[in-house]
Image: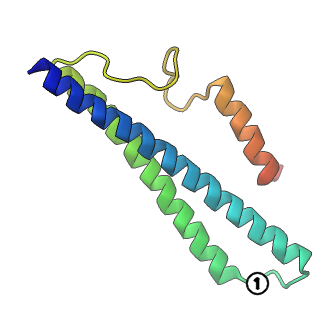
Amino acid sequence: MSDIRYNAAKTVAEQIQLAEQSIDRALSDIYTLMARMADARVMAKLPVRAGIEVLSEVHAASANAYEMRNRIVAAHRRFAVLKGRIGLGEVSFGETGDTPAYGEMSDDAVVAAARIEKIVPIAA
């Protein structure tokens, strides 16, 4: 019974990690699209209202993707609790090392965020 539960949990753990990665890639792609749309408007010397409806739709998609990310992270945490309730130890792991406190970024995440800022500059 323990092997069956472990294998089932491992399958779920692998899939949730894939889902998290897919959502992050989608968010990155959407944010890059928004930046390129804005840059293209400026390069083409179009009025500020040009394409605003399209940009609004893409922005709404980014908000939905961000909510999806929050939900999958919450589900991941609930899976961790459930794992303990059904008597399983570690099933899978992502990055090695301690899990950072909620909202805290690792050095790798800070570097990734800096890379994103080069694509989508954050106004000072």
Q: Is residue 8 visible?
A: yes
Q: Residue at x 77, y 66 (%)?
A: 36
In the picture provided, is 106 more to the left or to the right than 88?
right
Q: Residue at x 50, y 49 (%)?
A: 22
Expressed as whole percent of the image width and height from the top left, the position of residue 124 reads 83, 49
Expressed as whole percent of the image width and height from the top left, the position of residue 6 reads 21, 23
Q: Nearer the viewer, residue 124 or 15?
A: 15
Q: State the SS at label 1.
A: loop
* Mark 1 nearby-residue class (10 Å; few <14, some 14–19, many ≥20): few
Expressed as whole percent of the image width and height from the top left, the position of residue 120 reads 77, 54
The amino acid pointed to by label 1 is Arg
Q: Residue furthest left?
A: 1
Tally the numbered discs: 1
Q: Residue at x 16, y 20 (%)?
A: 3
61 up-or-down from 98: above or below = below
11 up-or-down from 20: above or below = above
Q: Residue at x 54, y 69 (%)?
A: 60
Q: Is residue 78 visible?
A: no
Task: Provide the residue designation for mark 1.
Answer: 49
In the picture provided, is 101 more to the left or to the right than 82?
right
